[in-house]
Image (spheres, rainbow, N blue to C red):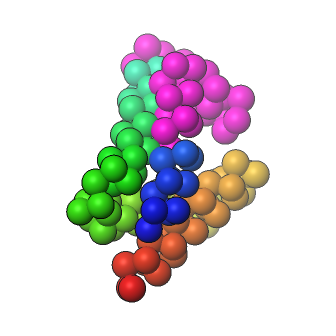
Amino acid sequence: MTTFLALSALLWTPYGLWCLVRPEVLAEVAGVTATTPTAVAEVRAMYGGLQTAVGLLALLALARPALRRGVVTTLGMLTGGLGLARLLAVVLGAGLSSYTAGALVIELGSVAWAAALLRR
């Protein structure tokens, strides 16, 4: 579990902080543009704040072993929701960019890894 949590923390925290500080980065890496102040706030909240919190949750579980199983369950559910919604978007015609493919590998891979850990 510690490897899963450590990699989750290393993946989610820096990306979240990057999107929080530089929301325009999503235009560069994913083609997501925020063209109004509300949109910039939304990008900062959903890509910045939420993803940073996911990474910090993984760090918290590393520091507190009693939380690990619950956090692995939470990470599995969160990445499952992201991955399934992203996969549905592709099926509905959004197309499969390299960003989307990479995100699907990370998200659905995280679900599979979390499920395997929880079956032990």
Q: Quadrant of residue 56?
A: top left
> Image height check: is 92 above or below 51?
below
Which residue appears at 40% of the width and 21% of the height?
41
Q: Is residue 5 above or below residue 20?
A: below
Q: Residue at x 39, y 60 (%)?
A: 75
Magenta span of residues: 12-39
Q: Quadrant of the C terminus?
A: bottom left
Which is nearer the eye, 48 or 61? 61
Taken as a whole, is the magenta stretch helix, strand or loop? Answer: helix
Residue drawn where x is 46% and y is 81% of the image: 116
Farthest residue, direction left: 66
Pick the front one: 109 or 120: 120
Location of residue 69 by image quarter: bottom left
Q: Is residue 53 visible?
A: yes
Task: Based on the picture, tell me whether residue 15 belongs to the magenta stretch.
Answer: yes
| Position of residue 20 measured from the top left corner of the image (x, y, whole percent) | 48, 24
Q: Please identify the residue farthest to the right as the structure is shown.
A: 98
Task: State left or right for residue 78 relative to residue 109.
Answer: left
Q: Work out whether residue 80 can be spotted.
A: no
